[in-house]
Amino acid sequence: MVAADMNISRRAGSFNYLEKHPERRISIFQNSYIVAITLTAGIGGLLFGYDTGVISGALLYIKEDFEQVKNSYFLQELIVAMALVGAIFGATISGYINDVLGRKMAIVVADFCFAVGSLIMAIAPNPYVIIIGRFLVGLGVGAASVTAPVYIAEVSPSEIRGGLVGFNALMITGGQFLSFVINYALTKVPGTWRWMLGVAGSPAVVQLVFMIFLPESPRWLYFKNKKEAAANVLSKIYPSPRLEDEIEILEFHLEKEQKNKVKVNYSDVFKLKEIRVAFICGAGLQAFQQFTGISIVMYYSPIIIQLAGFKSNDAALFLSLIVSGLNAGGTILGIYLIDASGRKKLTLGSLSGVAIALTILSVACFIIGHGNASQVYAWLAIVGLALYIIFFAPGMGPVPWAVNSEIYPEEYRGICGGMSATVNWICSVIMSISFLSVVDAIGLGGSFMILLGVTVVAIVFVIIYMPETKGLTFEEVSNIWKEKAYGKDKNDISLVEKTIT
């Protein structure tokens, strides 16, 4: 009986535990402390979204001020892509900062990069200084993309973890929507693009101030042997007796880690089979998020709309604003669906819809590209663009970030999260720095046809490699990878067996 009770406590937050003790289940809005942490950490997602989305409108006006930008596809692509290059370095560096200095310090570093980069862009005398500012902002974007979902996941009860991490994705799409609103609002203001790019410094300062009052991740604290501080944070998240159960399972896994303590290196991700299998899944989802075209749609939607037949800047920005609004709305739906329907089913439904949308886009743009100037096909392209976002936003928007925040063991979460986010940004750079050149070579319809082919491959990848992690604790997810790597007969001894022995 004692062993059974111990097993329940050591599986706090697991599906069986909450089935046995439904009164210990926590809802999203039940605890204002969790909500406050999520909202504040989500400002990083807002900045991430704003700084990646704002360039689509700002670029239209940068071209008007600088002739060399107007005459060079390469400079246009470089201005867009430099933030993503910065994000690659930011994501990689933040993995180290997360593990050594903590999640809170990584967010502070990201805010500093956002603020300084925004200021530099606002006062830039030439496009090359804009590029420097974009790189600094990109460092912040990369750090925020890794840290915010991990920080939120580690303060969240398992039963609402997907929704709360999904909220960070909502903040990203909300930031993108806000960037289009501000872009459209500033079209008649002198120095249009300077205001567009400089505004992002304000939320960074606000988050920096709020972070002074927020705690470090309790899991990070506990695994750094700062147990009293961790227990203090956990007491504000969980009521008794679940609080004691959560602390006990942390203690159990800390003892396990210390007993088998090894120095974690980047090479271990590829040497240890269960970590490698998890990383293939996480990095694959991040790669397909970009290779199915979201960066192209968000960074170049005004240009895509102009190529489809709506020539004025105002019309392109207004229609892009609608597309971005659909993105934010779809992400709200995703917050509910990610825990209600599960990660895998949601991802497959999302990719299937994206494939349909890309088919419509390809056909419409192919016809337009062959000289048919009918507004019917221009509007058909807009419909395809809208459907793309409607299907992408609830699934492929939040799921890769949510899954990567929960599939790695504690000691590898920072490193693997950083590496996986780096994959995302490398793929985003590839897409954004090549899109206009590819369109120039094979046309808009052909470009979307390539994305359609990649989407089909992504569906196959999800079916084969992605497990369902809905409602599972971090430890239960870890056991999935051990089973995939070594088979059931070679899986680690269960927590029940460990307790009994």
Image (tube, grey):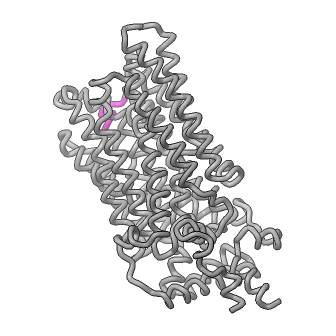
Q: Position of residue 410 (x, y in %)?
A: 51, 74
* Residue at the (37%, 15%) spot, across then down: 369
Q: Nearer the viewer, residue 199 or 399?
A: 399
Asked whether the viewer can see residue 206, the reply is no
Principal secondary structure, stretch drawn in magenta: loop
Q: Residue 192: within the magenta?
A: yes
Q: Which picture quadrant has residue 496?
A: bottom right
Left or right of 403: which side holds 79? left
- Relative vertical location of residue 279 with respect to residue 410 in this rendering, above or below: above
Q: Position of residue 293 (x, y in %)?
A: 43, 37
Q: How many marks on residues?
A: 0
Q: Report the span colored magenta.
A: 189-193
Q: Residue 23: within the magenta?
A: no
Q: Position of residue 109 (x, y in %)?
A: 36, 65
Q: Position of residue 219 (x, y in %)?
A: 55, 77
In the rendered view of the protein, which quadrant contains the N terminus? bottom right
Q: Nearer the viewer, residue 109 or 7?
A: 7
Judged from this view, the residue extending furthest toward the front is: 489
* Residue at the (19%, 26%) spot, across then down: 71
Q: Which picture quadrant has residue 236?
A: bottom right
- Relative vertical location of residue 356 with respect to residue 349 in this rendering, above or below: above
Q: Nearer the viewer, residue 232 or 211?
A: 232
Left or right of 451: which side holds 193? left
Left or right of 24: which side holds 377? left
Q: Nearer the viewer, residue 64 or 227?
A: 227
Left or right of 457: which side holds 433? left
Asked whether the viewer can see residue 74, the reply is yes
* Residue at the (33%, 55%) spot, across then down: 88
- Relative vertical location of residue 106 with respect to residue 470 in this rendering, above or below: below
* Residue at the (36%, 55%) spot, across then down: 114
